[in-house]
Structure formats: C-alpha cells, structure tokens
Image: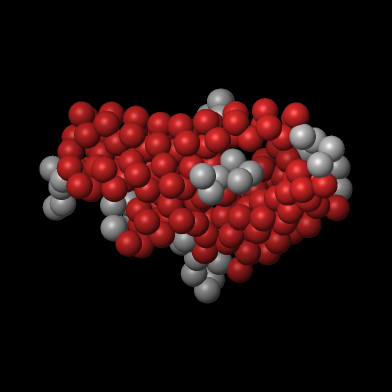
Amino acid sequence: MSAWQLNWQDWWELFSHFMQLSLMAIGGAITTTPEIHRYLVTEHGWLTDAQFNSAIAIAQAAPGPNVLFIALMGWNVGLVSAGWLGALAAMAGSFFGILLPSSVLTLGITRWMAANHKRLGVQAFKAGLVPVTLALLVSTAYVLTTANAKSTDWPFWLLSAATAMIVWRTKLHLLWLLGVGALVGALLV
C-alpha cells in the first residue's frame, strides 16, 4: 500500500472536479490537461509527472477515443491509494465525471444551435470558440512539454516547435511526424 490513502471526501472531490472540467472541455478532454495536471500532480501529489505523461501517451497510442487518458489517470490514482477496487472506482468516477456533464450539455446546445443556426449570436459563438480551443490546446502542449523538462532538453523543444510548424504549414500526415519524433526520442535518450 502507499503512503497516502484516499478518503470518501477525496473520492467525491476527484469525481466532482472532473465533472467541472467536463464543462470546460472545449475541443475535447485533452484541452483540460493543464488543469488536470495542476490538480492531480501539483496540488494533491496523487500522480508523478512521469505517470501523468505516460497515461496520456498510452491513451493516445491506443485505439479508441483520446478521452481514455482520463480513465488511466483515475486508474493510477486509485491503484496507488486503494488497490484494485480503488483503481476501478477512480477510473469509472473520473471517466464518467468527465463525460456526463459535457455530453448532456452538448446534446442540448447542438439541438438548439441547429434550430437557430442563422442567428448572428449563434454564428458569433461558434467563431469565438476557435481561439478558445486553440489556446487550450497550446496550454496542453506547454504542460506536456515542460512536465519533465530540463535545460539539456533543447532538442526536444526544437523538435516540438518544428513539428508544430510543419503541421501548421504543410499537409504532411501527422503519423509521419509521430514516427520521426519516436525515432529522435529513441536515439537521444
């Protein structure tokens, strides 16, 4: 067992925090990564930077929706604090906490927006979400890039910046860039 245990209040806070984040997940659950990192790693210390990054990497590599990283983080928190039963409970709680509120809200708003798509306010709202989503994705990239950063990691920073520019300015498929990144990472580590 670990040095710390989650109590019922911690379990509820974990679930309710993910429910709140669900409403902020503009652009997908991945955009909530900076706040999840702050909550799980910095504030509570329930995960290390390595566990946090590994959960995201495994979920992104696995087939299926990218929201799987939420379940993996919940699994890690529960497993360390309360064993297998805790892992299942934390995984389910965090996963459903992030899915339920945004799914219900999205269903309602999508139906309303489809019925009112010609209104200027609806068009302005949709246009205004673009910079919000972009900012959330940039903050996610920053957290993932700096989580284990050292001053000697400049090649990785350079690779990240080059990849972002290539994705932005060319039509090169992202899988080629991921392959190059994996190769460079294997050679430099």
Q: Along the line of sight, which residue is nearer the eye, 128 or 171?
A: 128
Q: Left of 41 or right of it: where is 34? A: right
Q: Quadrant of the N terminus?
A: top left
The residue furthest bottom is: 151
Which percent across, then down, holds residue 23? 51, 44
Give the vertical position of 162 relative to 183 (above or below): below
Q: Left of 58 or right of it: where is 138? A: right
Q: Along the line of sight, which residue is nearer the eye, 160 or 67?
A: 67
Instruction: Write the residue at 77% across / 48% down.
Output: 121
Which percent across, then down, holds residue 73? 38, 42
Q: Left of 118 or right of it: where is 189? A: left
Instruction: Write the residue at 49% across / 42% down.
Output: 22
Q: Along the line of sight, which residue is nearer the eye, 69 or 112?
A: 112
Give the vertical position of 25 relative to 111 (above or below): below
Which percent across, then down, holds residue 148? 46, 61
Instruction: Write the residue at 63% across / 64% down.
Output: 157
Query: Which colouring convention does the figure follow?
Result: secondary structure
Q: Along the line of sight, which residue is nearer the eye, 90 or 111?
A: 111
